[in-house]
């Protein structure tokens, strides 16, 4: 379980003004994904453009976003998060306003590309800025960003439909006004971020080099073919539906709502039950079948409406599991893996809207759906061919790995003392995390002495996947190591034979329990000691409850605020602080 690196007393909603400013801008930024869907037919009619010409709004936006992903980390590592954030916001304001004032489809397509550049700069730094500024912990910051992302994706088409019913220029000017508010609020309330350390600068070539790794290449290729189907649905369906701006806004609002719900709630459940690769394979196959069915039933407006909304369920699962798989399997740092993956998936799929428009104009209405289904089917094949590289296995534990980014073992047990332990005593696992980690370790000392077994302290470092679009490390490597070292020291100073280990979990908070349970089973643990869940308000919804309900061993839940659980053994020396935790008294020293 992870520790919250920031604490606050105001609760989730008592965030600094800077956090709300960036979160507001994030909502508007993610509106851009579906904002123009309801106004595509109106633009085509008013500017006398063909569907394929209008769909270049998506092609230019996604293509530039993909290429920009190669440079966003490099830019942020040189000028700092705040300047990168403000640069992205300024570009979105400028290009969206100019697009609204344009009178030619070519100008709007070009300006939409500039919008994509600004959006790439913004989303590359928004999450890290919110995490760095939020009160109440990193986990709370991730939830806030996740809420902003989901709200933006779902509300974008709705706002586009409402403003688009007045004029197709409305959504462009609306974004410019809202982002201007976000720009001013961010500039005023967000403190100046420190100058980036020169040693941590990212090269523009790092994401390209990452593609040499089979794991990154596999996820990128899978995403390219899947995004062809995704972008076909997003950009072409508004023409096939034949609805007005209002009605299109409502349809794609339903799509965005389903996408957000299934990304947050259903995808993690599938991941835990059947695994990332299998869950992704089923979702891709389902989306393939849906696109083919929409092609068959293209003459039915009702069938297409239902198809768009149902597609959101598949896309929510696919986006989350794809991002999770990249973060689990990529042998490079998270920002580099994310940039490489985004570059391939956006650039590769950007051609889909234009091709879909051409097919709809010159072949048939259903042809784009069939092509989208065929391309998505290829993604299933790629996933199967590369399944061995995408299993998402955490590297095996190796001793003396203190300086690596992988799992770490800290051996603190004298050999002679370890040999004196009873061979029959199964190890005791202590799962630590959060602000009470050190106290929980200290409270476990009398339990370890009573059992006469070796203790294995386990700390799981979390990487949360946010609505399938990004991932956040909830603590740094240094913070995780410091927490583990402090917990191990508490036990070592009491004469308890102890080892410590860092492990990693990618996905949701609930996946931490799986990592702990699996490791406890591997060690043959006879007892698991856990503390209060640092990220849940109720025990029933958190990691602690999952461990208690599925553990292969006895489970003891300790809570420092509940008071002592026993007295130190007579005649056995122990550190002063843990003793006061055990029974509230000072220990006796021998």
Image (cartoon, helix red, strand yellow):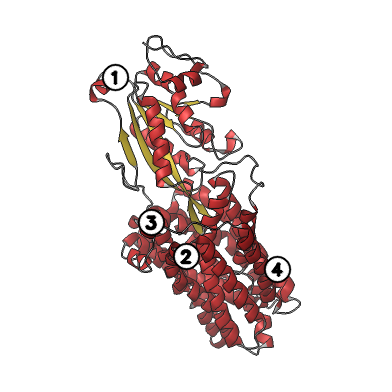
State the image coordinates of residue 59 (x, y, percent, origin top left).
Answer: 52, 78
Query: Tag 4: Cα neighbours inside 10 Å, few (<14), some, or many (≥20)?
Result: many
Q: CA distance from mark 4 to mark 1?
A: 67 Å
Query: Which dot, 2 or 1, sits closer to the camera?
Result: 2
- Which residue is located at x 35 percent, y 34 percent? 500
Disc nearest the viewer among 1 and 3: 3
Whether 37 is drawn above or below 557: the answer is below
Left-right relation of 504 to 357: left
Query: Which quarter of the rendered picture does the C terminus lie within?
Result: top left
Circle nearer the viewer, 4 or 3: 3
Mark sitting on residue 333: 3
Which sits in the foreground, 178 or 62?
178
- Label located before the other in sequence (4 or 2): 2
x then y, percent, for residue 159: 70, 68
Q: Which mark is first along the chain, 1 or 4?
A: 4
Where 448 sits versus 325, above or below?
A: above
Mark earlier in primary sequence (4, 3): 4
Q: Secondary structure at mark 1?
A: loop
Please tell me whether residue 91 is drawn above or below residue 210 in the rendered image.
below
Residue 133 — which label?
A: none
- What's the distance in space between the residues labelled 1 and 3, CA to CA? 40 Å
Give the camera-side residue of 244 and 291: 244
On the picture, is 354 further left or further right than 39? Answer: left
Disc 1 marks which residue?
421
| x 67%, y 63%: residue | 155
Q: CA distance from mark 4 to mark 2?
A: 34 Å
Q: Which residue is mark 2?
A: 79
C-alpha separation, residue under disc 2 versus residue under disc 3: 20 Å
Q: Is residue 271 above or below residue 84?
A: above
Which is in the foreground here, disc 4 or disc 2?
2
Q: Residue furthest bottom?
A: 48
Q: Secondary structure at mark 4?
A: helix
């Amino acid at each position: 379980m992870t520790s919250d690196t920031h604490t606050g007393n105001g609760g989730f909603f008592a965030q600094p003004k800077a956090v709300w400013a960036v979160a507001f801008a994030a909502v508007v930024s993610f509106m851009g994904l579906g904002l123009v869907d309801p106004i595509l037919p109106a633009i085509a009619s008013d500017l006398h453009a063909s569907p394929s010409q209008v769909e270049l709004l998506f092609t230019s936006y996604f293509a530039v976003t993909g290429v920009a992903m190669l440079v966003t980390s490099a830019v942020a590592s040189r000028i700092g998060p705040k300047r990168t954030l403000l640069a992205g916001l300024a570009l979105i304001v400028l290009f969206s306003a100019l697009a609204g004032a344009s009178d030619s489809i070519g100008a709007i397509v070009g300006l939409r590309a500039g919008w994509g550049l600004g959006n790439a700069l913004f989303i590359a730094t928004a999450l890290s800025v919110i995490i760095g500024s939020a009160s109440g912990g990193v986990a709370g910051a991730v939830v806030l960003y996740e809420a902003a992302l989901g709200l933006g994706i779902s509300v974008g088409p709705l706002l586009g439909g409402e403003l688009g019913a007045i004029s197709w220029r409305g959504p462009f000017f609306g974004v410019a006004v809202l982002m201007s508010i976000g720009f001013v609020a961010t500039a005023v309330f967000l403190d100046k971020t420190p100058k980036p350390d020169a040693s941590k600068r990212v090269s523009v070539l790092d994401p390209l080099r990452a593609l040499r790794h089979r794991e990154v290449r596999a996820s990128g290729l899978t995403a390219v073919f899947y995004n062809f189907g995704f972008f076909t649905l997003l950009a072409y369906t508004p023409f096939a539906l034949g609805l007005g701006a209002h009605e299109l806004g409502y349809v794609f609002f339903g799509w965005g709502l389903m996408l957000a719900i299934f990304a947050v709630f259903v995808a993690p459940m599938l991941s835990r039950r059947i695994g990332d690769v299998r869950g992704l394979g089923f979702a891709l196959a389902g989306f393939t079948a849906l696109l083919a069915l929409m092609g068959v039933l293209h003459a039915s407006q009702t069938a297409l409406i239902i198809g768009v909304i149902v597609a959101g369920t598949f896309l929510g699962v696919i986006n989350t599991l794809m991002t999770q798989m990249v973060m689990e399997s990529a042998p490079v740092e998270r920002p580099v893996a994310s940039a490489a993956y985004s570059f391939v998936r956006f650039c590769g799929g950007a051609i889909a809207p234009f091709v879909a428009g051409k097919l709809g104009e010159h072949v048939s209405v259903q042809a784009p759906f069939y092509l989208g289904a065929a391309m998505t089917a290829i993604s299933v094949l790629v996933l199967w061919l590369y399944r061995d590289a995408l299993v998402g296995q955490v590297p095996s534990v190796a001793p003396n790995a203190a300086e690596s980014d992988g799992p770490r073992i800290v051996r603190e047990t004298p050999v002679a003392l370890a040999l004196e332990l009873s061979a029959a005593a199964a190890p005791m696992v202590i799962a630590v995390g959060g602000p009470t980690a050190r106290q929980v370790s200290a409270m476990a000392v009398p339990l370890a002495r009573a059992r006469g077994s070796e203790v294995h302290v386990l700390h799981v470092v979390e990487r949360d996947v946010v609505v399938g679009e990004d991932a956040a490390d909830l603590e740094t490597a240094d913070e995780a190591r410091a927490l583990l070292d402090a917990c191990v020291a508490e036990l070592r100073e009491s004469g308890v034979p102890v080892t410590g280990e860092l492990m990693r979990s990618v996905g949701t908070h609930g996946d931490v329990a799986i990592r702990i349970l699996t490791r406890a089973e591997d060690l043959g643990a006879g007892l698991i000691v856990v503390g209060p869940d640092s990220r849940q308000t109720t025990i029933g919804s958190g990691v602690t409850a999952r461990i208690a309900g599925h553990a292969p061993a006895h489970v003891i839940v300790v809570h420092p605020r509940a008071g002592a659980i026993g007295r130190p053994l007579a005649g056995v020396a122990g550190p002063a602080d843990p003793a006061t935790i055990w029974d509230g008294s000072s220990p006796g020293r021998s």
